[in-house]
Image: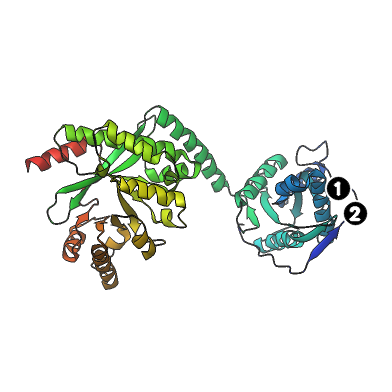
Amino acid sequence: MGSEHKISQPGKVVHFDRRGSKGPLPTTPASGGELGTTLCRELLSARAAGQSAQLLVFRISNFDLLVETFGPDFGNAAEAALLEQLRGLLRRREPVQRIQPGEFGIVGQGIRSEEALRAMTSRVVEGGTGHYEIEGVPCRLKLQIGVAACPTDSDEPEELLHFARFALRGLGDSLDSCRSFSRDELTRRKAMFRMEAEMEKALEEQRFILQYQPQFAVSSGAVTGMEALVRLVRDDGTRVAPGEFIPLAEDNGFIVRLGHWIIREACEQLARWRAADLYVPRIALNVSPRQLQDPRLVEVTESAVADNGLSMSDLEFEITERCMLGESEKVTETLTSLRQRGVRLAIDDFGTGYSSFAYLAWQPLDLIKLDRSFLARVGNDSRTDAVVQGMVNMARQLGLGLVAEGVENEQQANFLRRVGCEVAQGFALAHPQDPEAITQLLVEAECA
């Protein structure tokens, strides 16, 4: 379902003392599996009758924090207060079963539309969320719900519990209060875990490789640099594009280890070209926000450069605009340290997302990389033409270099010449290629 229920109940305070409770706190029965006898029986009854049903699993989202702060007895009291509050909101045929601490379940039957399901989940979330005074302690309880449908998602009670919990966990810290199970999301999650294992194995087995895309001077066609692009090679030889694993590597922190390998490998390759008398002015490497938090980034870079007889000015680090959003003192310190040592710093995909003139003025930058989306429209949209011309002029006024990405045809290349853009890269000029192919390209350029 994935819809957001906005909870606004100003002034609602539930006072609770266990001595005033109308009944004992429900516990998970010994029979019926983890789901419990009551919920299991209702789901099996619906299945036998050929009827649809929904398992709603809801939790007090801050329950663990409450228990850690006030102790397990307070947690029990909070559960009892919540159930006391929900008694008057739920129908008799909607009994609540406690599944585990802070987590409860309800089976909804006869719900035939999304609107009806939303109405039921709203009753639970809005009715249970609010301010409580539990044994004299003021606190706020917030509910979140995961939903699994029988028989659409499964007709097995324990599997429905697994699916509803999966949907519930997917809410995380979001403002949404309810989410329905999605098999596509489960498939993506499984693929994520497989890819995490694949990345670890690939690094151990040296199955990451770098391809290089040349950057060219717009006026002369001379090679001005190479952008290093990482690829993962599977056991069967197929290659995985960075878009399939880089976001995951950034999320789980693997990008730091992978980034160390990329820096060392790129420096070794540049040294090999230099040893063969093939001149490549510099190598550009993409650096993520997580890498800029790495305390060893400067040390690893210096070591890789020194080990290969290079200088720090042979490297260019491309950072995204996201790195600049609410940048920490550590990020600024790292960027400053790298630039003081000679590394050139570039803003990648400039002009999209959260572009800000502030970081162009305040951060130690050398280069802007114009996002490919602009070139896709030049020549057909006068406003885009004017924006690109303005960016070229701005970069020149600020003393920054500018590289246009995504050159895919001669019309775009001619436009860049007209507006005075100095450097470009893209498929019309050269695709990302393995080092051997780039070596051949450099040899031919030397002979030309």
What's under tag 2, amino acid-wise?
A: Ser
Give the answer, above or below, for where 69 lies relative to 91: above
Q: Is residue 448 visible?
A: yes
Residue at the extreme left: 448
Which residue position holds label 2?
A: 21
Nearer to me, 146 or 41: 146
Q: What secondary structure is marked by label 2?
A: loop
Q: Quadrant of the C terminus?
A: top left
Q: Quadrant of the N terminus?
A: bottom right
What's under tag 1, amino acid-wise?
A: Leu
Compared across the picture, whether 319 is left or right of 403 comes to right
Residue depicted at x 34% and y 62%:
361
Residue at the extreme bottom: 382
Q: How is the image coloured?
A: rainbow
Report which quarter residue 380 is drawn in: bottom left
Total marks placed: 2
Compared across the picture, whether 183 is left or right of 319 comes to right
Compared across the picture, whether 193 is left or right of 322 comes to right
Q: Are marks 2 and 1 in contact (CB under 8 Å)?
A: yes
Residue 53: horizontal and vertical position, in percent?
72, 52
Residue 9: horizontal and vertical position, in percent?
73, 68
Report which quarter residue 129 is drawn in: bottom right
Nearer to me, 407 or 183: 407
Q: What secondary structure is marked by label 1?
A: loop
Q: Is residue 94 visible?
A: no
Give the answer, above or below, for where 17 lies relative to 431: below
Residue 178: horizontal and vertical position, in percent?
65, 56
How would you rate the neighbour count of disc 2 (Cα within 10 Å): few for under 14, some for 14-19, many for 20 or more? some
Give the answer, above or below, for where 213 lies relative to 7: above
How would you rate the neighbour count of disc 1 (Cα within 10 Å): few for under 14, some for 14-19, many for 20 or more? some
Residue 6: horizontal and vertical position, in percent?
66, 65
Which residue position holds label 1?
A: 25
